[in-house]
Amino acid sequence: MPVTLSAPTTQTVTVQWATLFVPGAPAGQADPATDYTPNLGTVIFAPGQTSKTVAVTVTGDTDGGEPDEYIVVSFSNPTNALMGGNWGLGFGVITNDDRSTTLTV
């Protein structure tokens, strides 16, 4: 899932992001202790840009019995824009038989 602006702007837009583990969430949530490296940062849109990505490093495995898992990314504190979407949350999926890689959220 890309991080997008609904329209280009003439101002620089920033938004903070962080991976988020949600205790008690529905089954299938990736575990930051074993499935990916927790991370945070800031997405910066230059004037005119409308799409960016957030990278999360996946801890690979080849366990054939593991189902797909999802990662939650929280977005907050936008500047020069308003937050839309799903309460500032984004989701990425680690597919079964994942290898050590970078997941684009």
Image (tube, rainbow, N blue to C red):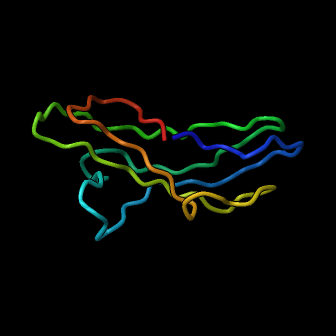
Most extreme residue toward the bottom, as rendered?
A: 24
Q: Is residue 49 left or right of residue 43?
A: right
- The vertical placement of 96 against 11, above or below, is above
Residue found 36% across the figure and 29% down from its top: 101
Q: Nearer the viewer, residue 85 or 17?
A: 85
Q: Residue at x 71, y 45 (%)?
A: 5
Report the side of 22 relative to 64 (left or right). Answer: right
- Residue 71's place in the image compared with 76, above or below, is above
Residue 76: image quadrant is bottom right
Dividing the picture into quarters, in which one does residue 63 lie? top left
Q: Nearer the viewer, residue 81 or 85?
A: 85
What residue is at 25 percent from the left and 33 percent from the top?
60
Point out residue 10 in the picture as x, y percentages from the top left corner.
89, 42
Extreme residue in the right direction: 10
x and y percent of residue 62 in the render?
16, 30
How many numbered callouts? 0
- x and y percent of residue 57 in the render? 39, 38
Residue displayed at 28% across by 36% down: 95
